[in-house]
Structures are given as structure tokens and as C-alpha cells.
Image (cartoon, rainbow, N blue to C red):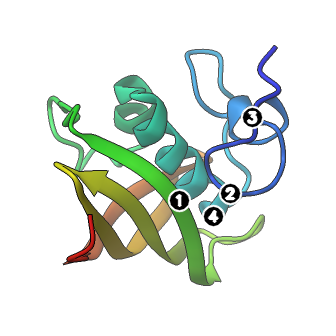
Amino acid sequence: MDTDPCPCGSLDVFDACCGRYVGPDGVAAPTAEALMRSRYTAFVRGDVEHLLRTWHPDTRPTALELDPSVRWTGLDVLDRAGGGLFDTEGVVEFRAHHRERGRSEVQHERSRFVRDAGRWVYVDGVVGTSRSTSP
């Protein structure tokens, strides 16, 4: 049982939050935002299988290798459109904070999600990254 705080910033413990969705026995996320948060958590935990499993087959890469020098440090959900329990499409805008090679960086993204066979999946996103000059 994992009672550590969930990396997605929800203020809930991992098992009661993204822990339900990641891993080989994970259930389908009920909303686009829940899926996005679980994907952020998968980046934090290095769970490539969850990332690939929740990526739309038309845009999913054949393989994914995470950069071990990146340490994800926080998530801010900025906006969402659609992506609810009864929607078929959704957009979630967020900022994902991380440190890479001693520098603080922020990935700002508007991600698109759709339901595929009843499950939310990531399609693509418009990404921007900003670097901080502070170590």
C-alpha cells in the first residue's frame, strides 16, 4: 500500500489518486484530467508502460525512453475544456515543473484527449518549455 502523497499534486495519497490508474492492473481514468494527472505521475515514477497504454494508437510512438536526468517536481492544472464523464473529447492545459541538468524548467502544454473504446487516451498537445536561470 502506497500512502505517500500523489505526485500529481491532488493532496490525496497515491493509492487513492493516480495509483488506481497506473500500473498493469490500473482501471480507466474517468475524466481527461484524471488521465493527464496519471500520465504526469507515470513520468515521475518512470512508468513507460502506462504512458504508452494511455496514448492514442494513431499518435503513440512505437517506443518511449524517459530521460533519467529529468526530475519532475510539480504540476499545475490551469484549464480544462470537456473531458468529463459524458464527453468524448477534452483538453487539459497544465504546467509541469521539472529540473534537468541543474536547471529549473516548466513544460506548458495544452493536451488533447479522446475516448477510444470507452477509455480516455492522450492524442497530442501543443508544448512549450521555459527555462529558469536560477539553479
Front of the two marks 3 and 4: 3
| Residue at (63% x, 80% y) in the render | 82
Q: Dots 1 and 4: beta carbons under 8 Å?
A: no
Badge 2: residue crowd in 10 Å (few <14, some 14–19, many ≥20): some
Residue 55, image x and y in percent? 37, 45
Q: Label 1 sits on what residue type?
A: Gly
Q: Is mark 3 on a helix, strand or loop?
A: helix
113 up-or-down from 5: above or below: below
Where residue 62 sits, quadrant-wise, is: top left
The residue that label 2 is drawn on is 9
What is the CA distance from the residue labelled 2 to the residue labelled 4?
Answer: 12 Å
What is the CA distance from the residue labelled 2 to the residue labelled 3?
Answer: 10 Å
The mark total stands at: 4
Residue 85, image x and y in percent? 77, 64
Q: Of the two numbered discs 2 and 1 on the same chain, state the one appearing first in sequence.
A: 2
Q: Of the two numbered discs 1 and 4 on the same chain, state the one appearing first in sequence.
A: 4
| Residue at (57% x, 83% y) in the render | 78
Image quadrant where one finds the C terminus = bottom left
Q: Label 2 sits on what residue type?
A: Gly
- Identify the disc placed on residue 14: 3
Q: What element carries label 1?
A: strand
